[in-house]
Image: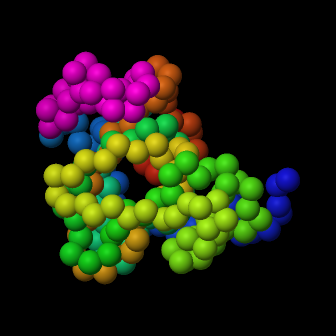
Amino acid sequence: SQSSSLMHPRNIHLKSSKLILNATDISPHTSGLNNLFMSPAFLHFISSVLQTELYPSTDPFGKYYANIFHVNDGLNWHFDRSEYSISLILQPSEDGGKFQFVPNSRDIVESWDEMPLDVNEVSRAFEPQRKSVEEPKLAAGDMYVFRGQNSLHRVSKIVKGTRINLILTFNSNPNVRLNRYTLQKFFGVEG
């Protein structure tokens, strides 16, 4: 049942801050990125890794984008709108900026009455299901393939330095685009 609590996972508004450069910002400066994104060999590789047929996002703004996090920026707990994301770490922060996630956790989170916010509280909330918050060690050049639509995740607050990552988005259906809300909220454009 849906709760009317402001802390219910469907109702909570979480603070996140970062600079986003969307695909239309990036494309004029690097044709190589679009060539990689649309490459049949790359798509075959990603589909093989995930063992599912994937299609590149057709959204002109959100098909790929860069996240730039400065000191005190972070990305709070959330699920992605696209099914699959490939994230390439271009520059990790010196302190903070950790990618933290709980694999295949959407159904569990949607059953909660309130959303814990602290990483320790989130870990405790998943203990009955024998799930835990994972935090891979990521360095410049590392790439991770991720099903963000089904896995709760965040980037912890940057304490020192700047974190830059590039996200490429894919779906199991062709011709998927972001909805108007997402375009406005994340990219500041009308859809």
Give the residues drawn in magenta, as a range. 30-57
Q: Tell me, what colour scheme is on the image?
A: rainbow
Snapshot quadrant of residue 14: bottom right
Q: Is residue 145 left or right of residue 80?
A: left
Foreground of the two, 186 or 85? 85
Q: Is residue 182 left or right of residue 136?
A: right
Residue at x 42% of width, y 21% of height: 53
Percent position (x, y) of residue 52?
43, 25
Q: Is residue 53 left or right of residue 13?
A: left
Looking at the magenta stretch, what is its main secondary structure?
Answer: helix
The location of residue 23, given as percent across then percent down, is 31, 39
Which residue is pictured at 31% across the width and 80% down the height?
159
Question: Dividing the picture into quarters, in which one does residue 118 lie?
Answer: bottom right
- Residue 21 vs residue 135, the one in the foreground: 135
Q: Looking at the picture, how far across and down is residue 139, in whole percent?
A: 19, 61
The residue shown at (23%, 42%) is 26
Q: Is residue 66 above or below residue 129?
A: above
| Circle count | 0
- Answer left or right for 140 relative to 189: left
Residue 85, compared with residue 17, is above or below; it is above
Residue 43 is inside the magenta segment: yes
Is residue 186 highlighted in magenta? no
Whether residue 190 is visible: no
Q: Nearer the viewer, residue 52 or 157?
A: 52
Is residue 134 in view?
A: yes
Q: Give how far across and how far down residue 136 sits, in percent.
A: 33, 61
